[in-house]
Image (cartoon, rainbow, N blue to C red):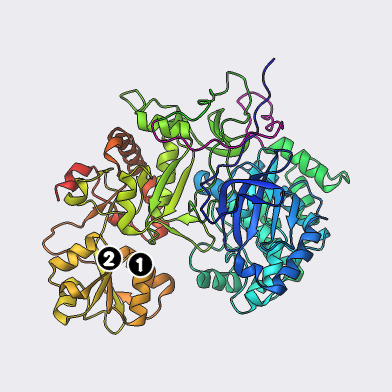
Amino acid sequence: MSRPPVPPRPALSDLSPEDRRRVGPFQVHGRIGAGGMGVVYGATGPDGGWAALKVVRAEYAEDAEFRARFGREIRLMERVRARSIAPLVAAGADDPEPWYATAYVPGPTLAQRVSRGGAMPLGQARALAVGMAEAIAGIHAAGIVHRDLKPANVILAPDGPKVVDFGIARALDETGITRTGGLIGSPGWMSPERFRGVSGPEDDVFAWGALVAYASAGRPPYGRGSAEALMYRVLNEEPDLSGVPGELVDPVRLALARDPADRPAAERLLRQVAWGGGGGTDRGEDDATIVATVVAREWAPRPAGGPPAPAAAGGAPPQAPPPAAPRGTAPPGGVAPPPGPGSGPGPGPAAPGRPGLRRGLKIGAAAAALLVGGALAIAGAPLLIDAASADREGGPGGGVPAALQELREQGYAEIAIGNEPPFGYIDEQGETTGYHAELARVVFAELGVEEVRAESVAWDALLSGLNSGKYDAVAAGMYITPERCEDVVFAAPDMANLEGVLAADEESGKLADYASVAEEGRRIGVLNASASQEYAAEAGIDGEDIVPFGSMAEARTALESGRVDAIGGGAASLRWMAEEDLSGYRVAGGFLPEGQAEPPVSGFAFAERDRELVEEVDRVLAEMRADGRLLEIVEPFGYTEEDLAPEGMTAEEACRG
């Protein structure tokens, strides 16, 4: 008799000394993630079952009005009945630190799925739309408005989509906390009336339309950018629905109507989408039955020549997660073998959650990836991206490098970003993005590593963290210099970078490059331990006038306060800063550093021990450069083909300077 599959379990990061080890009846095992409202823990209850336990931040817990509303919302959440939600299982509204726990839902978030796999196939997008509509209808029937529907709050579970974090945003949105500090919500998914301070059930319908468009077209209908830019588009522009399948365009357009009175109720959208694709007729079934029918028909990937793959089976509560194994050692229990011929997708060994900050933005968890019919599926949840490269044995030479094999078995790669737009940063939706972060996701997916987890790190700590073994790679648009090449191994350069100086509009003509800053005797801010710091010194700027900062955000604050007269760095990064959210400042133009005939180039950095892994990364980068995918990834971040590193250039050439 075969053993029943083991259900997936949360991927947990370590608890901090301040984290509680027990909350109510729950034993806390580690962090799943954190957000603006509080910390989410992976915990087990008295029955051993896993739960996602959210503990509210102290600043909210101390607000009496919030606590009162929190208690009322918890009581309403207990009334929600819907198939497509993570149900509330317990709460401590009156505890010194209020908390609530929902059933743990395995699977990637919608944000994770789209960022790695692009647009969902029509059938799965239809099932997603129907499931979310059923969840919204159930939430509204209980007298709740979600108010923060976004890709990170939709988990793609093996048995269909699940909406999480419903109900509590209202407790925040209607207290003095937010009346003085802004709205609770995520720009780009918020309705026009939310920006005007009005909210109702129609707001969730608007978010539904934006999420369905995002899932089916592979991009947000109002684009990306700063909160101000997104707010302007939502209030004044029509959504971009190009790429949304024809049968979904009408319901999405109705849901995104600027006037809330013109938006349909969630129940109507559920039936319109469920039966609008020719898959059947409305027979008067209840919402949950309709969702179950559509999910069974559309959700799971179909093995070639076979019926829909079954969803993961349930089972006994899993054991507590084992501690993470160090690089170079096998995890406890080894690695589960891939499914045999003819077997459908079932749960495999646990893998970590969506990319995010180790102690900041890690939300949700995905089960192990299984190859099914040439597509990648996460514990039966849909992730239909080309996984042919995962079958390759390390390229033409054969043989998988040990470091790559370890990452495949581990299920994820841990990368460090500098949180410097547009290389790698946390956007307004709380997602890790940037050209180098997005490039890392695609490169590692091509190599058969299904997950990338990103942590924002101070610039001067990037390489030390890499060499200590804390990270598998640095994806920060780091310049390749002879000095750095003595400490780490770089992949083939992907971008060429002119330097730039950011200054006030009226000053930018005089402060056009480092030499002019030196001539004017001005103070300039740079990233600590960056190549720009060296270039500024080589151009003759006095040492006391070169002010190093740990991040561009700190440098920007210093510029706006007058502590420095300008900021020096990569021209693309500085242009991005000026164009996105820093009016009154600009970059005069890009320039070559003193004494250089060619622009500096940048690329991924790896530890010396991973040199063979770098060869595999180089192979993938060359393929992406040749087929145009590299350019497609960097274009949304303001780069053009002229900004790409010289084709065929190697890291060895760049290291020679």
Q: Callout 1: 10 Å neighbours few (<14), some, many (20+)?
A: many
Give the residue displayed 70% in from the left and 14% down from the top: 1
Residue 124 magenta: no
Distance from disc 2 to disc 1, alpha carbons, whole Å, reads 9 Å
Q: Which mark is residue 49?
A: none
Closer to us: 641 or 435: 435
Say whether disc 2 or disc 1 marks the residue closer to the N-terminus: 1
Kindly indicate the quadrant of the structure image that contains residue 167.
bottom right
Q: Quick one: which residue is furthest to the bottom in this view?
A: 506
Q: Is residue 415 left or right of residue 165?
A: left
Residue 458 image position (x, y, % from top left): 36, 59
Q: Secondary structure at mark 1?
A: helix
Q: Please report the residue visible at 35 percent of the width from the left and 65 percent of the height from the top.
A: 551
Q: Which residue is mark 2?
A: 569
Instruction: Tell me if 211 is positioned left or right of 587 in this view.
Output: right
Asked if labels 1 and 2 touch by Cβ distance under 8 angstroms, the answer is yes
Give the answer, above or below, for where 258 lies relative to 413: below
Stretch in magenta:
300-328
